[in-house]
Amino acid sequence: MKITIIGTGYVGLVTGACLAELGNTVFCLDVDQRKIDILNNGGIPIHEPGLAEIVARNRAAGRLIFSTDVAASVAHGEVQFIAVGTPPDEDGSADLQYVLAAARNIGKHMSGFKVVVDKSTVPVGTADKVRAAIQAELAQRGATTQFSVVSNPEFLKEGAAVEDFMRPDRIVIGCDDTPEGEQAHMLMKKLYTPFNRNHERTFWMDVRSAEFTKYAANAMLATRISFMNELANLADKVGADIEAVRHGIGSDPRIGYSFLYAGCGYGGSCFPKDVQALERTARDYDQDLLILRAVEAVNDQQKQVLGKKIVARFGADLSGRHFAVWGLAFKPNTDDMREASSRVLLGELIARGATVAVHDPVAMAEAKRVLALDFADAPEKLARVRFCESPMDALRDADALAIVTEWKTFRSPDFDQVKSLLKNPLIFDGRNLFEPALMADAGFEYHGIGRSIHTRA
């Protein structure tokens, strides 16, 4: 099939590359010439395991095209995926300006039947707005071309997006109950047939239910994380071990183990934005989602937990103190710094007068860019951050180590070397990578999240 992907960001690039891998001819459009140049020169603008190889293979085979030519992109694909950004607006709602701009471009140039697929995460009712935008452009040029707007939300985890796309748990597709919707149904079924050979993974529903499903899924996962973080904070107070609790409740099949890990808060491009957008949608309908408001509030507070633990140990004035931080990206296997907990911790430590040495296996370049924006009003503060090429280099002469991202490379360090490089054998573990008893045996003072037996060397 001939497919057009509008937007070569995280979702668009993964979707386009994976559909090309299945034998489709995919035209990827982006208005950012710099990004298109990177892709056409063999580069990848994001870090995602396995993606570079798929892009290179399908570019070489002629199945993957990158361009800024809007008219050519509309002419190419019988299915047009809109996969542009939907950043949060000032009031927390999803900003649909890029989605609607893509829809208008389709309306301006289409000359035959098109299936327009909302792949971006969008609020309930967005398909109606996309349909209206296309119809307005068609009316302006006196065209009567038929089309259908479909909702096909993505369920991709950063760091495992290629695997998620190629072996999906589910494929959610919302179509209209119209003749055009039936035609769209057949084309979408044809497109996704390769994923359903083993067993049926597609869930067909109406468009609004499909739009709602994406937000509901992310809201549920965010709720589990914030719930466990609240319990972890209480576990610290009452003398319980949240890891033991996690095993105890996760063994209940009604609960399960997924997304029950306590830590220093969630970040990224999805959970924070989608929780806010769902809350905003509810307010538009005079509903107050009390649980989701609490989820967001808990997460905002949880990002401050590591800083509070450090202040409790060293005092409010950290002038003259120096800390090592392992992990900057919001999660492992990505360089994404959006809403990352590390940014909150670094801001707190620097505001209190400390200096910091940081290391991340992948996100160093992106971290430098983002932190320059965070400290734009006080560049002298950014000068107190040293970016280190290795985790061990970051430890030199640090008063303590704080772990923010659970990269695998951090899980089994040479603890003798760690102790020799630190001024104090002291670890603040924001992701509970280590066992408190083992840390005690190794001579470390260890502070986890909800692991109340703080050992002191």
Image (spheres, rainbow, N blue to C red):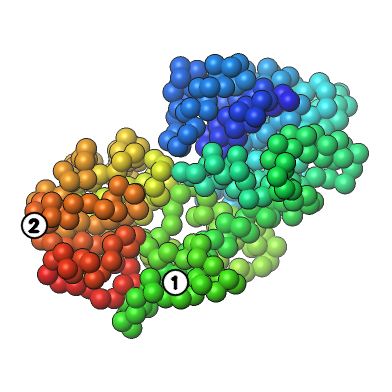
Q: Position of residue 410 (x, y in %)?
A: 28, 51
- SS at badge 2: loop
Q: Position of residue 257 (x, y in %)?
A: 50, 65
Lower position in the chain sequence, tag 1 or tag 2: 1
Residue located at (75% from left, 41% from top): 150
How many marks can you see?
Answer: 2
Q: Nearer the viewer, residue 127 or 203?
A: 203
Q: Position of residue 33 (x, y in %)?
A: 50, 20
Q: Tag on residue 423?
A: 2
Three-letter residue code for mark 1: His
Disc 2 crowd, CA 10 A, few/some/many (<14, 14-19, 20+) = some
Residue located at (76% from left, 26% from top): 78
Viewer can see residue 354: no
Residue 73 position by quadrant:
top right
Location of residue 14 with respect to 58 vertically, above or below: below
Residue located at (62% from left, 20% from top): 63
Q: Tag on residue 60?
A: none
Disc 1 crowd, CA 10 A, few/some/many (<14, 14-19, 20+) = few
The quarter of the picture where the C terminus appears is bottom left
Location of residue 271 with respect to 454 vertically, above or below: above
- SS at badge 1: helix
Residue 384 appears left or right of 281: left
Q: Tag on residue 247?
A: 1
Residue 134 appears left or right of 301: right
Three-letter residue code for mark 2: Lys
Q: Nearer the viewer, residue 200 or 237?
A: 200
Between disc 1 and disc 2, the foreground one is 1
Viewer can see residue 90: yes
Location of residue 86 with respect to 38 vertically, above or below: below
Residue located at (42% from left, 46% from top): 338
Residue 443 appears left or right of 75: left
The furthest residue to the bottom? 238
